[in-house]
Image (tube, grey):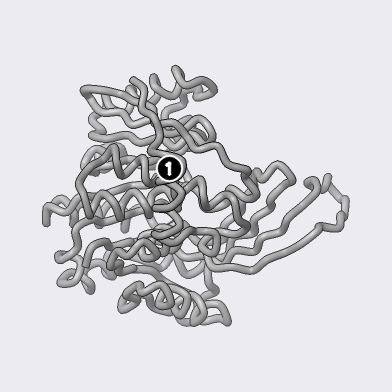
Amino acid sequence: MDIAVIGSNMVDLITYIDKMPKEGETLEAPSFELGCGGKGANQAVAAGKLGSKVMMLTKVGDDIFGGNTIQNLESFGIDTTFACKVPGTPSGVAPIFVDPQSKNRILIVKGANQHLLPAEIDKAEMQLKKCSVIVLQLEIPLETIYYAIDFGVKHQIPVILNPAPASKELDFDYVCKCDFFMPNESELEILTGMPVETEEQVRKAASYLIEKGVKNVIVTMGSRGVLWATKDNAQRIDAYRVDAIDTTGAGDAFIGCFTHYYVQTKDILHSIQMATGFAALSVTKRGTQISYPTKDELTQFVTEKGLRAVSQ
């Protein structure tokens, strides 16, 4: 197995809006879509679509959404041996609102995801030990995150932590045990308490995390590209210019693609460049997982556009 994703799944309830209603106001919205999402599932699907062998540890509800979520993961070739239903519990859902500028606002209801506890990692130990990378997010209990990080350290498996949604309760002693820490701009701001409006401010906030002992900080900055910082260097990788329709799930697309190429090549810069292209393609279509390109589509896009430039 190439990749283990220990994390969340959600049912995406996506409403495309002309504007957000005011308090007490009812507005008609142009369209609605129902889809499979959740940060963990999105990252697993992104890697799976590119050809990685992925296993996922997750919990679904025993409602009408649970079985569909498992079937959806399996349709992308993901091993769902440890994707289990929780009796008497609803599935996680994510109401998402997308405005005409393709910006989104998201609420999450964790539901069954709250029941993904450390004991599930013990149950999957034999399979997890065979994985090349462990991927984590923060839509499951922090105790499970910490247990998974320690598992990775114990078995010398690289760990990628996506601190989303950002939580100030996150213990940075555990973050420093991870090989990659991958926030977006807003998550970086919340976790450091530092401004991120300019690239220089992002660099300072990333440097702050490096000084605390984080090994690799990779900050996704939307149209401004990606910043990769280590104790020795910091460099920005340009973004691709595309006509964005829906940015929902773009960060997950980036992480899933990065993980796929990192497992294949161990080349961090190349993995970032490919993930930048994958995420760019994902925002040109509506939805989350359904917007993710195939490997052939990504290869064609990167070949035509070229790999993104890097600046110090």
Q: Please give the count of numbered marks on the rendered protein.
A: 1
Residue at the spot of label 1:
276
Against 255, is 186 above or below? above
Above/below status of 162 relative to 176: below
Q: Is residue 1 left or right of residue 163?
A: left
User: With respect to residue 219, does 264 lie above or below?
Assistant: below
Quick one: which residue is furthest to the front in this view? 304
- Residue type at the position of mark 1: Thr
Q: Position of residue 70 (x, y in %)?
A: 44, 77
Q: How many residues crowd around disc 1 within 10 Å: few (fewer than 14), some, or many (20 or more)?
A: many
Instruction: Pick the residue in front: 310 or 127.
Output: 310
Q: Is residue 88 visible?
A: no
Q: Which residue is drawn at 68% across and 66% down?
A: 33
> x%, y% of residue 310?
36, 27
Q: Which quadrant holds the C terminus? A: top left
Q: Which residue is located at x 42 percent, y 46 percent?
A: 302
The quarter of the picture where residue 54 lies is bottom left
What quarter of the picture does the N terminus occupy? bottom left
Circle 1 — which element? helix
Instruction: Name the residue at 21% across, 22% down.
Output: 232
In the image, 141 versus 231, the foreground residue is 231
The percent position of residue 249, horizontal first and vertical second, equals 52, 53
Residue 57 versus residue 283: which sits nearer the camera? 283
Residue 207 in view: yes
Left or right of 11 in this view: 48:
left
**Residue 162, x across and y down, in percent:** 38, 46
* Picture residue at 46% right of the left edge, 38% below the top: 184
